[in-house]
Amino acid sequence: GNSVTQMEGPVTLSEEAFLTINCTYTATGYPSLFWYVQYPGEGLQLLLKATKADDKGSNKGFEATYRKETTSFHLEKGSVQVSDSAVYFCALAPSGGSNYKLTFGKGTLLTVNP
Amino acid sequence: DAGVIQSPRHEVTEMGQEVTLRCKPISGHNSLFWYRQTMMRGLELLIYFNNNVPIDDSGMPEDRFSAKMPNASFSTLKIQPSEPRDSAVYFCASSLVGRGLRLANQPQHFGDGTRLSIL
């Protein structure tokens, strides 16, 4: 079946540090890949997405590139802010008939200190 | 624009009681999802509706769980009888799938969730 593995947290950084959260996936065909963010007490929000190999998704300074050869979709940001503190989820949607069925990673808690 | 609205935000009840969670999707969206989030299992899809019709309920844990969508603007998730292991955060999400659009590429918009505690 499909699966998503993302780096264990928590991750604690100082403001303006570089962020990488690793995500690898297992799926057949050509899934779509997503990063969602969850702020405390809220639901998940889509951060960025990529729908085919070599696509780069970007939003709010975050980037991730769909690498089919390494089955990865790592999240990066060059300079994090305190307001980026949240839980980040990598997810995939399969190609084919069940393409509504998002498979989520376990989530990575990011804390950014001033 | 109003997002996905869930109620209640918090629910604490005793084992054996009936629990009803409510969701109002974003107006115009035609797909609705119920998820459960726990520390142990992460986020799990419970059921997916399209145009008010249940398409996939394979994630519903057991017969104690039921979900309905009587119209495009309202859905309920009911647990009867409730058990302590049902304690979790339950999320509702909605999305729009139109002609030529691939559901996988359309973002799911999540509500703020209902934190359920069964004592």
Image: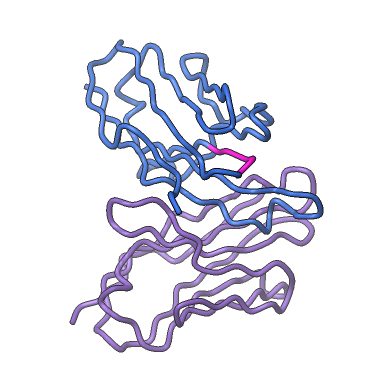
Chain colours: A purple, B blue
Q: How many marks?
A: 0
Percent position of residue A111, x then y: 26, 70
Q: Over which residues does the magenta segment extend?
A: B29-33
B10 left or right of B107? left
Q: Is the magenta stretch mostly helix, strand or loop?
A: strand
Q: Which residue is drawn at 42% across and 58% down?
A: A107
A31 left or right of B19? right
Displayed quadrant of residue B69: top right
Percent position of residue B104, x then y: 68, 54
Percent position of residue A99, x then y: 71, 48
The vertical placement of B67 against A54, above or below, is above
Q: Which of A85 and B102 is in front in this view?
A: B102
Q: Residue at x 60, y 44 (%)?
A: B28
Examine the structure image and report whether residue B30 is included in the region drawn in magenta.
Answer: yes
Quadrant of the drawing holding the C terminus of chain A? bottom left
The vertical placement of A78 against A110, above or below, is below
Q: Which residue is drawn at 72% across and 72% down?
A: A68
B88 left or right of B110? left
A106 left or right of B107? left
Examine the structure image and report whether residue B35 is included in the region drawn in magenta.
Answer: no
The vertical placement of B106 against B32, above or below, is below
Q: Nearer the viewer, residue A104 or A3?
A: A104
